[in-house]
Image (cartoon, rainbow, N blue to C red):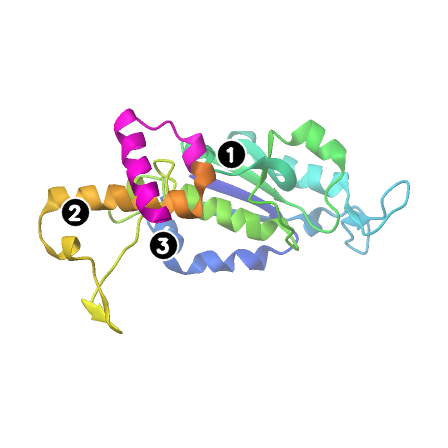
Amino acid sequence: MNFNILTIFPEIFDIFNVGLISKSIKKKLIKINTFDIRENSVNKHNHVDSKPYGGGEGMVMMAEPLAKTLSSIKKRQLGKVIYLSPQGKQLDQKKVVSLASRKNITLICGRYEGIDQRVIEKYVDEEISIGDFVLSGGEYAAICLIDAISRHIPGVLGNKDSYLKDTFSDGLLKGNVYTKPEIFEDMQVPEVLLSGNHKEIQKWRLENSLLQTFLKRPDLIAKKKLSKKYKKLLEELASKAIL
């Protein structure tokens, strides 16, 4: 997977020099290319922003530096152009999986009050938001998006099946997890997890996943199409939880 990132702060992406993605870069499973928008400034002061027409607060990133930066990327490596924006459709696991199938993705990281609308209309294929909150720049949203996509690229994870059991992978939250010691501050690990009975452990994990989703994110339950068996199980768990 090849990621192209348009930014005025390429050093922010040094974060990928550590951790899972760093290892994947060394294995050449992922490539991160940063493009400094300031290098394509159209004035001697290297400004890439200007006051908005019609007045108003803040500054707006100008169209020309962004367009010039995009044109510096080879067409075969450009791929889908995404603008990280609060106006975009909110990112979810389904979208992450869809994007992971691509070979090239280009991310535009906005700053200030955003980017000139004409760039969006002419060059952007899709706007994506990572949530209904405000960040100081699109770089942080891009980091989240790249990390989420990377988990679905073959070879990135040590266990190729581990992402299948992640939270949201099946539309539900992942259930509670435990490790050593068996007793911590008088709190005991659920006995079933120590039983060695894999069938019962799997059943417990399913039930706990349903219960945690019901308690913490009931909106996810409403979106997921549950089988009759799961609906009945959820009703039983919900009644116990209420009691």
Residue where numbered disc 1 is placed: 77
Look at 81% across and 56% down and name the residue there.
45
**Earlier residue among tags 3 and 2:** 3
Q: How many marks?
A: 3
Quarter of the image for residue 84 reads: top right
- Cβ atoms under marks 1 and 3 closer than 8 Å: no
Report how far apart the C-alphas of labels 3 and 2 lie in the structure.
29 Å
Which segment is the magenta one?
A: 221-243
In the rendered view, would you say 24 is above or below 87?
below
- Residue 62 x %, y %: 77, 43
- Residue 93 x %, y %: 43, 37
**Earlier residue among tags 2 and 1:** 1
**Earlier residue among tags 1 and 3:** 3
Amino acid at pointer 1: Gln
Q: Residues within 10 Å of mark 3 (few under 14, many from 20)?
A: some
Residue 20 shows which numbered tag? Answer: 3
Amino acid at pointer 2: Ile
Q: Residues within 10 Å of mark 2 (few under 14, many from 20)?
A: some
Q: Residues within 10 Å of mark 1 (few under 14, many from 20)?
A: some
**Is 66 left, or right, of 219 in this rendering?**
right
Amino acid at pointer 3: Leu
Q: Nearer the viewer, residue 59 or 39?
A: 59
Residue 201 shows which numbered tag? Answer: 2
Look at 66% across and 55% down and name the residue there.
136
